[in-house]
Amino acid sequence: MLRWIRAQPSLNMVPVIFLSGSDHPADLWNARESGSQCYLTKYPAPAVLGQVVDEAQRFGLGAPALECFRLPMNLLLK
């Protein structure tokens, strides 16, 4: 689904957040290669979800779609 989203120019600025029960390196690699900005494992604290919303709003203001969310808990950055 994410590859389809990224193939649509009109949806390129939509941030994509993976929320998964897996922290397996192959799953992280697939999310990164498909164009996700954030990958969190279940179940993030409410404060973390607030930070994710703040980062999504930053993307809505024009941050590049290929950039990752700058959150310490974003596993794509590790």
Image (spheres, rainbow, N blue to C red):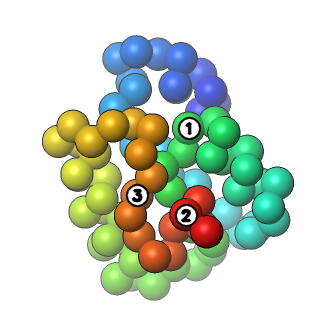
Classify 17 as above or below 8.
below
**Of the residues shown, which amino acid type is indicated by label 1?**
Gly
**Does label 3 or label 2 sit earlier along the sequence?**
3
> Horizontal and vertical percent for residue 67?
41, 45
Judged from this view, the residue extending furthest toward the front is 78
Question: Callout 3: few (<14), some (14-19), or many (20+) C-alpha neighbours within 10 Å?
Answer: many
What SS does tag 2 mark? helix
At x 25%, y 63%, the residue is 54
Q: CA distance from mark 1 to mark 2?
A: 13 Å
Q: Is residue 3 left or right of residue 71?
A: right
What residue would you read off at disc 2? 77
User: Which of the marked residues, 1 or 3, is nearer the chain's N terminus?
Assistant: 1
Label pair 3/2, CB-CB below 8 angstroms: no
The residue identified by callout 3 is 69
Residue annotated with mark 1: 35
Decide which of tag 1 and tag 2 comes sooner along the chain: 1
Rendering coords of residue 18 (x, y %): 58, 55
- Vertical arrangement, residue 65 with respect to residue 30, above or below: above
Q: Crowding at label 2, few (<14), some or many (≥20) Cα neighbours within 10 Å? A: some
Residue positioned 34% across, 32% down in the render: 13
Residue 55 sits in quarter: bottom left
- Amino acid under disc 2: Leu
Q: Position of residue 68 (x, y in %)?
A: 45, 52
Identify the image quadrant of residue 34.
Answer: top right
Q: Secondary structure beneath disc 3?
A: loop
Q: Amino acid at mark 3?
A: Phe
Quarter occupied by the N terminus = top right
What quarter of the picture does the C terminus occupy? bottom right
Q: Nearer the viewer, mark 1 or mark 2?
A: 2
Q: Is residue 71 above or below residue 68?
A: below
